[in-house]
Image (cartoon, rainbow, N blue to C red):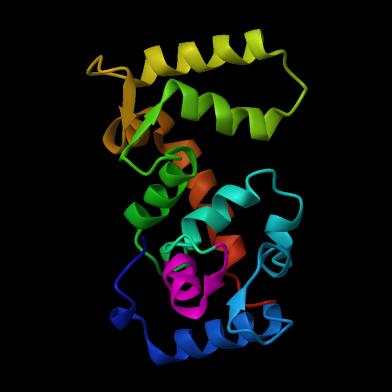
Amino acid sequence: MGQDISQIDSNEIQKMLQKFGKLDEDNSGALSAKEFMQIPELTSNPLVERVIDIFDSDGNGEVDFTEFIRGMNSFASKGDTQYKLRFAFNIYDIDKDGYITNAELFHVLKMMVGNNLLDEQLQQVVDKTMIYSDKDGDQRISFKEFCDAIGPSLREDIINHLNKITSDDR
């Protein structure tokens, strides 16, 4: 996940190292979920667990510095739009198979809406989204279908939100 870290400029790596060092309170060289949640945009984000899962590419429950660089670079201001959109797609692609299923979409949306919708209402939203987005009829949403479905204005909102997480004022 994320761009090749060998392409990241040394000043950017230094900034990320400083940010990582501030978050790594126990100096373990890896961020726990609790430490990771110190990023202000993630503190109250209901999808924080999904973000951590995406950063944690080796699945050990912590985010080491290399994983942090790859993840942060995925949506750095200078980062490629396709990487940012892929990150957003990966929030929904829980099993990491390259597709979003009805169940995955339901699960992530449930995390977002909590108990504000009945499960039946949420399932209706999911079903309509699947019908609208699944252009090839394979009962799942590919990355291309995801990008086509979100449209330019939502795409811009996603990119702007991801850019805030990597801003230099923290």
Tell which residue pokes out farthest to the left in this image. 136
The quadrant the N terminus occupies is bottom left
For the point 36% across and 56% down, the residue is 83
Tell which residue pokes out farthest to the front in this image. 60
Q: Give the range drawn in magenta.
A: 61-73
Is-magenta flag for residue 70?
A: yes
For the point 32% across and 17% down, the residue is 139
Left or right: 107, with 148 as reference point: right
Q: How many labels does the image show?
A: 0
Q: Position of residue 137 (x, y in %)?
A: 25, 14
Instruction: Please identify the dominant SS of the magenta region.
Output: helix
For the point 52% across and 76% down, the residue is 64
Q: In this view, does 24 lie above or below 85?
A: below
Taking depth in this image into account, of 135 and 67 the one nearest to the observer is 67
Is-magenta flag for residue 16?
A: no
Q: Position of residue 67 (x, y in %)?
A: 45, 71
Q: Where is residue 84 in the image (x, y as percent from the top left)?
A: 42, 54
Taking depth in this image into account, of 60 and 23 the one nearest to the observer is 60
Which corner quadrant of the image does residue 35 belong to? bottom right
Q: In this view, does 169 lie above or below 154?
A: below
Which corner quadrant of the image does residue 120 belong to? top right
Q: Where is residue 2 in the image (x, y as percent from the top left)?
A: 36, 63
The quadrant the C terminus occupies is bottom right
Q: In this view, does 49 lie above or below 124?
A: below
For the point 54% across and 69% down, the residue is 63
